[in-house]
Amino acid sequence: MILDLDQVKRYDAQDMLQLLSGFSGQCRHAREIVEKFQLRWRDKSTPNNILIAGMGGSAIGGDLVKAVLNGQSPIPIAVHRNYSLPAFVTSQTLFIAVSYSGNTEETLQSVKTAYAKGARMLAVTSGGKLKEFADARHIPCVVIPPGQQPRASLGYLFIPTLSILTRIGFAPNLDLNGDLDETIDLLTKLAADFHPDVPDSLPKQLAQHLYGKLPILYAPQELEAVTMRWKGQICENSKSLAYSNVFPEMNHNEIEGWKHPPALTQQCHVIQLRDAIAPPQTQRRMDITADLIRQHTAGITEVHSQGGSLLARLFSLIAIGDWTSFYLAILYEQDPTPVDRIQQLKERLTD
């Protein structure tokens, strides 16, 4: 299990490696796009709530926006993954539709409903039906580059939404430019550290721990978006099941499940994602839980964030997870890019 560049090239037929290596550049480009974007809303009043609609890789950006602004926004921020909208969506809602392709059917249906309800609206997309709908109704639309998998476009899907919400006053204490500078610099460093030419990097070690095992991802509630990203990336890139939960909720139910069936639990490798954002009580719960369940697992590994700002720390963990899922795909002799079952499902839905 060397995981060198030759082995990577053997299976990475569509060059996911290039997208991972260039992620910091994508984030820089996304910032340039939104800096040039002119936001025009006739209604200048403050909304009562913010709803970010999306699915899959397009929705994770909304989860991260919520994580970054959770301690700053004076109004609630929710992420919506479904066709129908909750009843609280009204003309006082700021509704942000995020769909990389612009053709995600769940998002498109929720967009039509939000428009009918008179919500203030914004779209982030590379084109498709969402852009057509927005253009026809003069809805502000941030247009991002097409041609990538949504999960490989997180910078384009996340940074415009966060930047616009910051611009209109929902993050009064956030130094977004400074935090983005730090995040981009850190992502550049991590891409070099995690390249296939570097032996025994952290993602390579983690992929080897997870190979042939069922990954179980645990983190503080404050990092729920990051655990969802890890889970989604392992499923889509590695073609492997993975499961996640958060503390302290996990301690009120799931901790009791770590006993049966032993043939399964002994094949589960636990990854604990750690960051200083978690309250001391949560950190202690994670330590004690690891002690209590360790004998029932294939192993427990802690992964710690890097960086100073919350934004940099979140994205350091995301980068580690993305690269881990990539190397796990190579160990499973899988091309990480295609998502054949998702495509088959979409085709059947249109029959």
Image (cartoon, grey):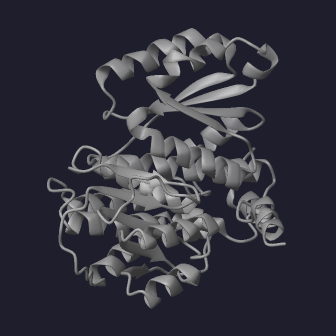
Q: Vertical placement of 101 versus 57: above or below?
A: below
Query: Can residue 261 be seen here?
Result: yes
Query: Can residue 24 be seen here?
Result: no
Residue 241 found in image quarter: top right
The front one of 50 and 90 is 90
Q: Residue at x 64, y 22 (%)?
A: 299
Q: Position of residue 250 (x, y in %)?
A: 52, 23
Q: Residue at x 59, y 20 (%)?
A: 254
Question: How many labels were placed on the picture?
Answer: 0
The front one of 325 and 125 is 125
Residue 189 appears left or right of 266: left
Quadrant location of the C terminus in the rendered image: bottom right
Q: Residue at x 59, y 70 (%)?
A: 18
Quadrant location of the N terminus in the rendered image: top right
- Which residue sits furthest left? 172
Q: Residue at x 18, y 58 (%)?
A: 175
Q: Vertical placement of 258 versus 173: above or below?
A: above
The front one of 296 and 330 is 296
The front one of 197 and 221 is 221
Q: Position of residue 338 (x, y in %)?
A: 75, 65
Q: Position of residue 108 (x, y in %)?
A: 56, 71
Q: Vertical placement of 350 versus 257: above or below?
A: below
Q: Position of residue 27 (x, y in %)?
A: 40, 68
Residue 95 found in image quarter: bottom left
- Which residue sits furthest bottom? 136
